[in-house]
Image: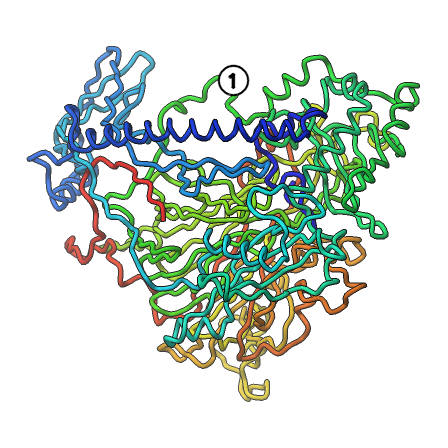
Amino acid sequence: MASQTGNTNSHNNMTSQGFYSFKPEEVSPEKKRLTLRTALCTQIFGVFLFTVGLVAGLLIGVYAFHGGPDKAKCVPPDNAPSPQAVRAQNEAVVENKMTTTREPVTTTRAPVTTRRMPKPPQTSHSHSHGHDHDDHGHDSRGRFLRPNDDSHPFTIGTGEKTTERHSPFGNTEDPTTTTTRTTTDDATTVDTPPSTQATCSVCSWRNPLVQSDKPEIFAPITPDEMKQVQDAMYQAKITTVKEGDDLAFNKSYIQSMALYPPIKADALEYLDRGGPVPERHAWVSVQEGAADPPRYMHYKVGPLGRGSVNVKIVKLTTDNECPFEKRPYDTIEIRQVILFVMDELYKVNDILSESFDSRTPYQDLSVMPTGPMIDDEGRRTSRFTLSLRGLGDRDFDFLNILPLHGKVYHGGMNTSNWSLFDLFYINQGPFANVEDMYTAYSTDQVSKIRYPEGTRKATEELTFPKRNFYQTLRENSDFPGISSFEPTGPRYDISGNTVEYLGWSFTVATNQHKGPGVYNVKFKNERIVYENSLSDIGLVYSADGSGQDNIVFSDATFGLGESRKAMPGVDCPEYASYLRTTHWNSASVYPITKLTICVFEKDAQEPLWRHMGKAMEAGMNNRYLVVRYPTQIGNYDYIIDFEFHLDGKMVTTATATGFIQGSFWNPFSEYFQEDKERTPFGYKVSGTLVGPIHDHTFAFKVDMDVVNEKNDFELINWKYGSVKEALESKAPGGKIKKYPNYYFYNKTRYITWESVENETYFDIDNINQKFWTVINKEHKNMWNVSRGYRIVPMASGTQNILDDYPRNKDISFTKHHLHVTKYHDDEHFIKPIYNPDYESDPDITTKSIDDMVNGESIQNSDIVTWLSLGFLHIPTSEDVPMTTRVTTGFTLKPFNFFDSTATFDIPAHAVGPNDTVMDNAPRAGPCLFMPMTVQG
């Protein structure tokens, strides 16, 4: 369940351990003081243990690295052949196979003895450990967080079965030598290669971190800058809380912070012409409960870095743009809503216990407010749904949905005025309150459901995504999988948030609401992209249930930039480098820093290009740099990749995985009597679970500056017709004087060019295909063709929701695959994170994409492309318990930008006639790779 339009969902940073272990008496001040005292003592003890472990780890690591008694070395044997000799031997083998008959293979009927090779020593890495802030808002001040990569396996030649082993030095076997094979009783035949007697030494390594004093104008806002903003806002009396204060609805506090982008003209003046460094400002979202009237506001705060005395605070939204009742959810409100719903349901605990094998809602149930928030004549109302707690206190459970739903009014600041209403029990209702529902239940006015005793414990056992130990282990899955390594260390450099890699340079940053982006992207010193950033993720659900139907989410509301951390070895390879990101935690009134972005070079194990001729062969390995940002919004996990390829391509992908958000399969439904496991809204995928149909639409802002910011958007239309039509499409006046006689057929395919003059939108059309290109008509390549880049979308679903959909305005960016607009400094995102009150304030400051597309000219101007790509999801049984990765995205591909293929300044494999080696990619000798975790 990703996010809700215009408000924050129950899963926003609220999934810490014990979050749901509520009892009514646990909200008392005495309980809070005891909890804080216990937490403080625990943290002090944890720091002590960490210090002892760190010192021990360093001593062991130094000992192992400098040579314990078992230190392995990896060097070629003295008789290792040269590469040329290896090649000659390989050719001899080929010739032998073609012209001679080899001796028969000798086999011996004897059992094979196998053993595991010993592991080389492991190097202990020095780590600085921090602790995640808990989702109640307490921060452990772990500002130097590192991935949990305390150990790395280094397995060489392990395995329970003897398989064919090849020398790392090539084929050293004499092609005329008889190979001895051992055959096991089950007829498995294994080659025994000649021993090379190789030993291993540790690979060389270079540190990618580079020190630089050059200001990074796109780098994300720092913890110190955040604290400076907090101080300035508090001194200006815009906020009323400081670190350590308790939050309440009638107080004003900062909800989120991000860098306010510099004015583009100022940024280019600095980047391209050595102008002054643009000042840094923060974009600050504030819940102003203490204001009269209360409201939700955005501010621009800065310049930063000069002390609070010089800081100016400027309003970015009008006073009436977002009334307090229309503000986005935050963790403070969500927690109160959950507690209120649990308190109300506790009044009918007999229903919960008898129906769902629950003890109390505080112990066994999850409460999830679902979107969209309903604004009923100014009444702030949300729907909620219940589920069993299949993940215990570790996380929300989105799979084990229960058939009890309702609405909760949570407007105003006094929770005593809140109420539960429109309750449904197995779609029976609505009941005005819990008392009415209890009366109907106890007097048998409703059909009932009863989960068997033990369901609660079985649910937790089945929901956690771990290996099924009742299944037979898949053959060979207990061997380590394939892995890559860097034989000489990273081929990229990192300076702050700026990365350089084989001709590429760019800055990586995140926005607390919008997520990751790359800025000032250059290839071979020419700018390709000014900004490529995630702007939002939209989802629309359909289901048969009062709490699950027509759920609408806008994930930017919940903080796409609030990732927990990257998982080393899962999200990122062991050799990756990591960048820190910081977001503002409103509950603790303090910045939180984590290692969320990883950078690594990837080997695709395929050629980027190749050709094999009769007397020549040439090719290049497809290797490229990946900047990866994994994050989690409720049940769904998202992985955003920015790839930088050697030929000038830039690929952006968005991947979804995680849990589906389920809905209850109603066996009593009067509408689905036949084939009731297939409903109009999805399949039955588990015991009481339907996987509701939904979509995922990923919106990206892509501001391309091809050579410079003076660009045009040009369509290239693929057409079919007569030769005459093709020729006349380019002829002056659209007519040709003479029809040529050299065409084989009078039918052909051809292309036409169409310059787009004004702001507009486009959709992928697989029938009448078009190329989307951004070109610079003032700059030509060697062949006098306008230099450009092409936007190549991956396969994408299409939004079929029409304009009569009630929440259409909230998801307007999902209607088209591509919007093209003229650049404006105040058009930052594809939609706001809140729902503006258009009626009370028609002059809103934050626009949606359909407001931005207003017909302005985009010829020879700075243009922005907004891509909305995604997929339709019909969950099936294979999506339970986990959905495996589904990916969409787009490629920015050079389109006459270069004079020729852009890779011929890199060594590659090239062999000409007579085996003449014309070029060769550098290759490292065998060595023992020790993964090093680098943190920028």
Residue 926, located in which quarter of the rendered image? top left
Percent across and percent down for residue 159 are 31, 22
Vertical order, 98 against 863 (above or below): above
Vertical order, 468 against 127 (above or below): above
Q: Is residue 932 left or right of residue 26?
A: left
Name the one closer to the observer, 32 or 919: 32
Name the one closer to the observer, 598 or 307: 307
Residue found at x 64% / y 77%: 856
Name the one closer to the observer, 291 or 148: 291
Residue 912, located in which quarter of the rendered image? bottom left
Name the one closer to the observer, 317 or 906: 317
Percent across and percent down for residue 910 are 23, 56
Q: Is residue 812 visible?
A: yes
Percent across and percent down for residue 493 are 31, 54
Pointer 1 local density, CA inside 10 Å: few below 14, some 14–19, many at least 20: few
The amino acid pointed to by label 1 is Gln
Q: Is residue 61 left or right of residue 787?
A: left
Q: Which residue is mark 1?
A: 471
Q: Is residue 46 left or right of residue 361?
A: left
The colour scheme applied to this rendered structure is: rainbow
Quarter of the picture holding the N terminus: top right
Q: Secondary structure at mark 1?
A: loop
